[in-house]
Image (cartoon, grey):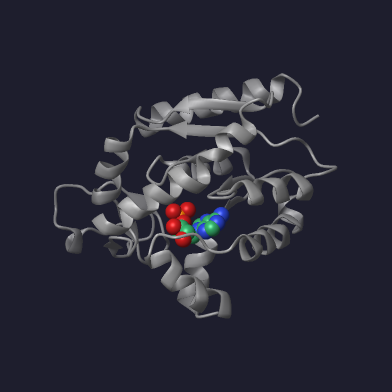
Amino acid sequence: MLGAPGAGKGTQAERLARARRIPKISTGDILREAVHTGTEIGLRARAIMDRGELVSDDVMIGIVRERLDRPDAAAGFVLDGFPRTVTQAEALDGIMRGRAPLVIIDIDVPEEELIRRLGSRLVCASCGANAAPPTAAAASVLCATCGGQMIQRSDDNDATVRDRLAVYRAKTMPLLDYYKTRPTFRLINGAATPDGVAEDLARTVDSVLGAGAGR
Ligand code: AMP
């Protein structure tokens, strides 16, 4: 699942994974968990994430290689937040050799809308669920999934959002050229409602799989 920060990758990856009963593998979630538990990778990643920069390709490729090797990913998975560089995409192609082809979906959202979404996004401090803020002040909003406290992600402040979008344009947008000629690549409009995007995504994935990918 490709797309800029704020395009809705995490939300849509979660919905698709749940509907297909396959794991959602989010490299951002894996890193935030590592920061939270204070592992060595987490300690090193924290400052990089707070600046909106990318964690090194070597570290990310190692994390994803190990995760995709686990048995629960054997029948399929939804990848959210990886690859983010051409080097990561090349490594992923290597990891996927001998497995079913990747379905590559780019969720497209105009930049003004990304900035608006990221500036107002809240996430649950306990379970990580995302939510658009209701009218109440952030401090009084509780997570609809687990009842935890909803907070602003530390990298969703104005300055870091602008840096993340710049990093996206410089490092991740070239992936579109890397993937766009593949028969399993599709672009979908991410500016629609979450339900609308989810329907479009499900239909699009089905059409790619129906055309022979994954067999
Ligand atoms: P996300 O939750 O996908 O927006 O990721 C949050 C942050 O984690 C990013 O801004 C990066 O600092 C880091 N990160 C997540 N995935 C990757 C990746 N594939 N490569 C490098 N850094 C990543």
* Residue 122 in which image quadrant: bottom left
Q: In which quarter of the image is the C terminus?
A: top right
The image quarter in which residue 145 lies = bottom left
Task: Report the side of 26 relative to 7 (left or right).
Answer: right
Percent across and percent down for residue 197 are 43, 29
Total numbered labels placed on residues in the image: 0
Q: Residue at x 31, y 57 (%)?
A: 156
Instruction: Please tell me which residue lies in front, 68 or 42.
Output: 42
**Above or below, 3 relative to 47:** above
**Residue 194 in sight:** yes
Quarter placement of the N terminus: top right
Left or right for 118, reference 168:
left
Residue at x-position 69% and y-position 23%:
183
Judge left or right: residue 142 versus residue 100: left
Is 73 situated left or right of 185 in this image? Answer: right
User: Which residue is painted at 57% across and 24% down in the image?
Assistant: 204
On the image, the x and y values in percent for residue 127 come to 42, 62
Q: In this view, does 185 lie above or below 72?
A: above
Q: Is residue 167 above or below residue 209?
A: below
Q: Work out which residue is located at the far right of the displayed protein and give it.
A: 98
At x 76% / y 22%, what residue is drawn? 212
Outermost residue toward the front in this view: 170
Can residue 19 be seen here? The reply is no
> Residue 51 at what x, y percent from top left?
38, 65
Q: Residue 84: x percent and y percent?
A: 55, 49
